[in-house]
Image (cartoon, helix red, strand yellow):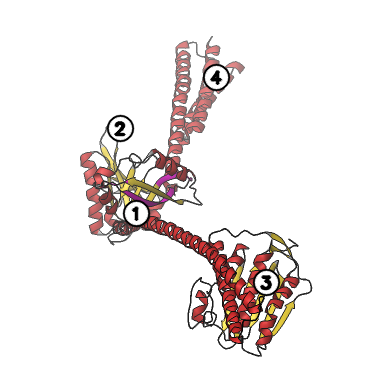
Amino acid sequence: MSEAILLSSIVLQFTAATLALRLVIVTGRWRAWSFIAVALALMGIRRSITFYRAVVGDIPLSPDLTTEVIALLISILMVSGVFLIGPVFRRLQRTGDELRESREILQSLLDHSPTIIAIRDSAGRYKLVNRAYEKVYDTTSDSLRGQPVDYLMQEQFAKELNEFDRKVIESGEPMVHEHFSDLKQGGDRLLSVRFPIRDNTGQITAVGSIATDVTKIRQTEASLHEVQQQYQAVVEDQTEMISRHTPDGMRTFVNDSYCKFHGKSKEQLLGQSAYEEMSETDLNELMTLYKNLTPQDPSGEFETCFPTPDGKTAWQLWAKRAIFDAEGRVKEYQSVGRDITDRKRAEETVQKALAEAERANSTKSQFLATMSHEFRTPLNAILGFSEMLRGQYFGPLGTDTYTEYANDIHNSGEHMLALVNDVLDISTIEAGKRSLVREVIAIESLLKHCLRDVEKRAADGNIDLVLKVSDDLPSLFADKRSITQIVQNLLSNAVKFTHQKGTVLISAEATDGEMKISVKDTGMGIPANQLPKITEPFSQADSDPHRAHEGTGLGLSIVKSLVEAHEGTLEITSELGLGTTVTATFPVGLTEQS
């Protein structure tokens, strides 16, 4: 019985020694638990030696079981104690590991935070700072730990920070304030949050501070404020009405001119709808304009009218601009409006004057056409009878003087008929009654025919007539009567104003799909200040050689009107003493090839 008790005691002692060694590993307290493990192991060895000697018969076991039972109970208690203490120490170990991990996470968060973080105890001594704090103040957390604020800061600035901490400790509430990073005004500005740190009893043991550099933000705000002030000054000084409103129409800004026009204060207009006084038609037109505004094309114009208290109509022109945010959504609409009532009324007056002038011109043309027709009947009789007298169809007149008078009557009649025809032509063209019958025209043949009409006059003045056309000249698709009249008028003018032994050159060429017909003379030329008026109808100027001779002054007016009726242009160049060149250009689409 005693041997069994002894053996059980040995097993329990070695078990306790083994558990003690495990606690060395678990707790990390190798000195204490190693000593206990060695003591238990030695006790087990001693008991093992006793058991061995009793078995081999060297010494007899004590017949008194009390001592062995007591030793067994002690071994059981030791094993139980070690076994029960082990989980406690393991929990403590896990708690310690978790605490170390939390500290490492906290330190990592503090060190990687861009904000400046510091913790000082209630006496104002540093307990912890992060890397951002170290970088800003060129220090280390280890060197600051336990140091007062004035160890790092200037005395006056340290007093200011301690005062902030004291207020937090006294109030027990967080505090937000802004200050410079040091005593230099204009240096970095910091926005700080200070907060109390309490122990498990609720007592404030330290004050934490988190500061952010807001220098650039404040500089940007200052610049923005300056720009806003400048914008405000510019906008308020404008005579135009300026306003801004949200997409739903709520006004966010109005200038003094806008308020003056509406007869209301800014307080009465801001926050109210800019759409409420608009007619349905104007509102629909405005919404259509807004829908078409894009970040690439954000502006447009909007014109509106409305009745005034005096019963008249007022007009406004608004320049609209959409203001987009970074995502391309409309944030606001800006409107700049000006009163265009005077301009509109002036335009109406001009339109009425133009209409009246057109009616007067039409009446004049109709009158001239009527009078020209009335003149033709007696002129034809004069020409007919004078021709009979001049030809002495019914016998001799009796004296040569009568024949001379008959010739004068006939020549004057022909001249008068030519004038009447010119007046009739210009009046017909201005009245829009001159119809064009287009056909294919051989230009070279037409020019030769027109030259024959002025050959006698040219020969009488000893003037050379020259024709110059290109070999590949295409045909012209136009009204033959009008083209003939154009060429005859130009040739007649050129011969009329060319000196003896002078030259009149008529040419035609096709370039880039255009047909150009030019008449160039070596006459007296036209003053430069008279060229702009040379084609005006019924315009006489003594200094203008083309007007100084007898005639109505309608020749070039008729030419210009007929050229423009063919969608062409008339160009006149001249130099005093050297001559004049008149060029009629007919555009692409009037040639046979096209």
Nearest the viewer among 294 and 36 is: 294
Comparing labels 3 and 4, the label whose residue is closer to the camera: 3
Q: Amino acid at mark 1?
A: Thr
Q: Residue furthest bottom?
A: 501
Within-10-Å neighbours for mark 2: few <14, some 14–19, many 20+: few
Image quarter where the C terminus lies is bottom right
User: Is 314 a magenta residue?
Assistant: yes
Q: Image quarter for residue 8? A: top right
Q: Measure the alpha-carbon separation of dots 3 and 4.
A: 133 Å
**Who's the residue at 69% across and 76% down the image?**
453
Q: Please give the range of residues in magenta.
A: 307-332
Which residue position is annotated with label 3?
Answer: 516
Which residue position is annotated with label 4?
Answer: 11
Between disc 1 and disc 2, whose residue precedes?
2
Compared across the picture, whether 500 is left or right of 340 comes to right
Nearest the viewer among 261 and 522 is: 522
Which residue position is annotated with label 2?
Answer: 200
Q: Amino acid at mark 4?
A: Val
Q: Measure the alpha-carbon separation of dots 1 and 2.
A: 80 Å
Between disc 3 and disc 2, whose residue precedes?
2
**CB atoms of marks 1 and 2 within 8 Å:** no
Q: Measure the alpha-carbon separation of dots 2 and 4.
A: 46 Å
Q: Amino acid at mark 3?
A: Lys
